[in-house]
Amino acid sequence: MPLDAILDRTFAAAEANDWATFRSMFADDAVMKQNVGPEQSIDQAMKTLPRLTADGTTLRYENVRRVGGKSNITEMHDAVFTKPDGRVVRIDLCVVVQFNEDGKITRTDEYLDSAATTGLLG
């Protein structure tokens, strides 16, 4: 499967709250790093990522731009969270995604505006 298609499926799973499919796109030893937090294993991240939408918040990705290489993709997008009360939190971010030869994600490095994330918490 082309890397673009793997990434499309990964982000579509997050939008659909299909965290099992999301997790399946990652290698077992994958790591995730955000500039606003510590590096985590994919299994550690799977304990926190679903909490972003557990209260009924919806997630969609907009304004997607990508640059790819043989084993990586750099994607810029807006993560748009709509809270149950109707508030919209838009976070412009950049994520560098690395893949292994089997097409599994091995590492993500995500860069975002930490101030924009405060709207998710309250």
Image (cartoon, helix red, strand yellow):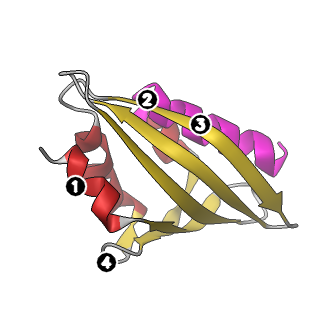
The reply, left or right, for residue 70 in relation to residue 56 is right
Q: Earlier in the sequence, mark 3 or mark 1?
A: 3
Which part of the image, by quadrant, shows the C terminus? top left
Q: Earlier in the sequence, mark 2 or mark 3?
A: 2
Disc 1 residue crowd, few under 14, some 14–19, many 20+, Cα 10 Å: few
Residue position for label 4? 38
Mark number for residue 18? 2
Asked where in the image residue 17 lies, by quadrant, the reply is top left
- Name the residue located 78 percent from the left edge and 46 percent from the top edge: 4
Asked where in the image residue 105 lies, by quadrant, the reply is bottom right
The reply, left or right, for residue 39 in relation to residue 76 is left
Disc 4 residue crowd, few under 14, some 14–19, many 20+, Cα 10 Å: few
Circles 1 and 4 in contact, beta carbons < 8 Å:
no
The spot of residue 95 in percent (x, y) is: 58, 62
Q: Earlier in the sequence, mark 1 or mark 4?
A: 4
Label 1: which secondary element: helix
Residue at the far left: name it. Answer: 122
Asked if residue 15 is among those painted magenta in the image, a careful observer would answer yes
Closer to us: mark 1 or mark 4? 1
The spot of residue 104 in percent (x, y) is: 66, 56
Residue position for label 1? 118
Q: Amino acid at mark 1?
A: Thr
Closer to us: mark 3 or mark 4? 3
Q: Earlier in the sequence, mark 4 or mark 2?
A: 2
Identify the magenta region.
1-19
